[in-house]
Amino acid sequence: MEGKAKLEAAIEQLQIVEKQMRLAGDVAGTKKAVTEILQLCFEAKDWKTLNDQITLLSKKRGQLKQAVTAMVQQAMQYIDETLDLDTRIELIKTLNSVSAGKIYVEIERARLIRKLAKIKEEQGFIAEAADLMQEVAVETFGAMAKTEKIAFILEQVRLCLDRQDYVRAQILSRKISPRVFDADTSKEKKKPKEVDNVVEAAPADIPSLLELKRIYYELMIRYYSHDDDYLEICRCYKAIYEIPPVKENPAQWIPVLRKICWYLVLSPHDPMQSSLLNSTLKDKNLSEIPNFKLLLKQLVTMEVIQWTSLWNAFMNEFENEKNLLGGSLGDKAAEDLKQRIIEHNILVVSKYYSRITVKRIAELLCLSIQVPPTPPLSFCVCVCVVVLYTCFCLLTLIFVFGNCVNGVTMPDFCTVM
């Protein structure tokens, strides 16, 4: 109780100083007074008083923006020092309410929201964490560093994918242009000093631009895998493959290049797929995985591929993908691979044959000629009814138009009917 009384007395004295400085418009003095009040509460580990003082000081009449900013930044340093999770959440919520609607602390609020969303995710509330992150539109923050903006949006996309909200994940991913990862900062024109000082430096835990590029394409792979869009997945792996740290490390680029080859084979035939296929075949690194080079060569060669022999040769490679970077190829991949080989063979047959029997094409495609099953009686009855009704309608129209031409009017026709 004695410590509590001393704390309250010290806070009262500092509040008097804070009022004098605030009314005098002394920015430095006001900032020092409010931060000392918060420091006293923190040293006393009186979290309730700390939250109360943050709210009280922010609502003072004519409170200076610089003082509120200093107070929020000071209190944010205490978040990781709190051992109790409930106390940490309460402090974050207090700071969030203080910074809400204040453009001069919008970056601090975004960081607070991200901390709170991380806690909610660790507690298992994925949907709640995703909703929290979507409250903040960091793309409008002019003072936030580019890498921090990208990292924040990627976190929004990841949480949407975790909650299987693929529509919103796509909308959020479009806020990031892939060209932003290819920007060469050394060639950019130097901006004026005034502009440089406006943009805050990104925190130390924010990944670099190249790391963010990899995270972005890995998230897009998750998104396109939902729709089995193999060509887009291949393009994402191609972008990861072109990242310098990946291309310089064989332990990283070999699994990625394998994925590129597999998804090229799985992609439907079109000009984009053909272009990627030819460019991949020209890659010198492909010689390190000769089996996949052979696989791609079979696709560009206009010869029929025997499915059984191809599957026997690559079945182990196909199943081993789940143990490599990027995981397995998906449940439908084996079935789709067979369909792509059939598609390739049909293209080959169409080039060399103008007429061919069903039996012969079935042999070339490694397919069996199946006799269609006898339809059920109810289906036959329905077909007969439809055919008879169609014939009746056609005969009626012929009769009507024929009699109209011969001078028989519609009432006469109705009488006949």
Image (cartoon, helix red, strand yellow):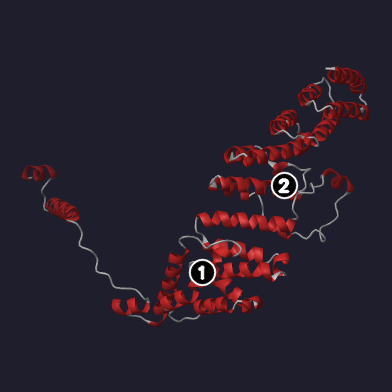
Helix or strand or loop: what does disc 1 sit on? helix
Residue 236: image x %, image y %?
61, 61
Q: Quadrant of the C terminus?
A: top left
What's the residue type where badge 2 is placed? Answer: Lys
At label 1, which amino acid type do we have? Answer: Phe
Residue at x 9% of width, y 44% of height:
412
Q: Earlier in the sequence, mark 1 or mark 2?
A: 2
- Crowd tier of the residue under label 2, counting other residues whose Cα lies within 10 Å: few below 14, some 14–19, many 20 or above: many
As measured in the structure, the alpha-carbon distance from the residue carrying label 1 to the one carrying label 2 is 38 Å
Q: Quadrant of the N terminus?
A: top right
The percent coordinates of residue 355 (x first, y second) are 32, 80
Label 1: how many Cα within 10 Å (few below 14, some 14–19, many 20+): some
Q: Which residue is mark 2?
A: 149
Q: Is residue 68 visible?
A: yes
Q: Is residue 270 visible?
A: no
Location of residue 373 (image quadrant): bottom left
Q: Residue tagged by mark 1? A: 318
